[in-house]
Image (tube, helix red, strand yellow):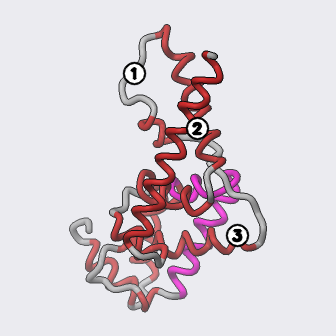
Amino acid sequence: MEPGEHDLLRRAVEGDGPAFDRLVLTHTPRLYRLMRRMASDRSEAEALVQEAWLRAWVNRRRCSPEQPFFPWLARIATNAARDAWRRKRPLDFADLGAAAEWVASDEPAAEFRLEEEEAKRRLADEVERLRPEWRMVLALRYDGDLTYEQIAAALGLPLNTVRTHLRRAKIALRKRLEDGDAVRVG
């Protein structure tokens, strides 16, 4: 928790609007990145972020100022995403954003940029094809930067289920990407 965030969170829980506004300003960019991975487009991600903040305000007394704030907020946001899934609205990873680090971490030479863009597109396509619960765990881990324990708490899942979802998602991605290379080469 950021220095001073404990007091800010305590005041927000007590109903201090300006303190809550500061939390919104601080955490919205990270929350938006997380929701962008779960939403089918930018407007849906924005709607999920707004819904999460509304729910956070309404349920602020349930938040413990002694605990890190973002995992609690992430749980609210993932519940909003689940509600969207229940309404049969498709959610997908429309762009890679920060997840591009999975593909390459260094600036590629000019001759490799086209290959890198193709790899990013393929990764995004394969992530989109994953089961929703696997995508959610991937997003919380890599975009939300949550620990396994925080993901388990946010999703209301056992810790081993989170580990299993993450492992299976990685295995599925690796297999699909390797199979795609075999098809292209062969």
Mark 1 neighbour class, 10 Å CA radius: few under 14, some 14 to 19, many 20 or more: few
Check disc 3 and report its element: helix, strand or loop: helix
Q: Residue at x 39, y 87 (%)?
A: 13
Task: Decide: is 25 above or below 8.
Answer: above
Would residue 22 be visible to someone looking at this image? Answer: no
Q: Is residue 2 visible?
A: yes
Amino acid on which disc 1 is placed: Glu
Name the residue tied to disc 1: 107
Sooner in the amino-acid sequence: mark 1 or mark 2: 1
Task: Please tell me the numbered disc located at residue 176.
Answer: 2
Q: Residue sitting at 66 percent across and 52 percent down?
A: 92
Residue tagged 3 = 84
Of mark 3 and mark 2, the one earlier in the sequence is 3
Residue found 34% across the figure and 79% down from its top? 9
- Label 1 residue SS: loop
For the record, the magenta segment spans: 33-58
Disc number lying in front (1 or 2) = 2
Looking at the image, is 121 positioned above or below residue 113?
Answer: below
Q: Position of residue 72 (x, y in %)?
A: 42, 76
Q: Quadrant of the C terminus?
A: top right
Q: Residue furthest right?
A: 88
The disc label shown at residue 151, or none: none
- Residue at 65% in and 57% down: 39
Question: Nearest the camera: 69 or 134?
Answer: 134
Is 56 in the magenta? yes
Foreground residue, 68 or 115?
A: 115
- Is tag 1's residue or tag 3's residue first in the polypeptide sequence? 3
Q: Residue 133, image x and y in percent?
A: 57, 63
Disc 3 crowd rating (10 Å Cα; few below 14, some 14-19, many 20+) is some
Query: Is the residue marked by circle 2 packed among few (<14), some (14-19), or many (20+) residues within 10 Å?
Result: some
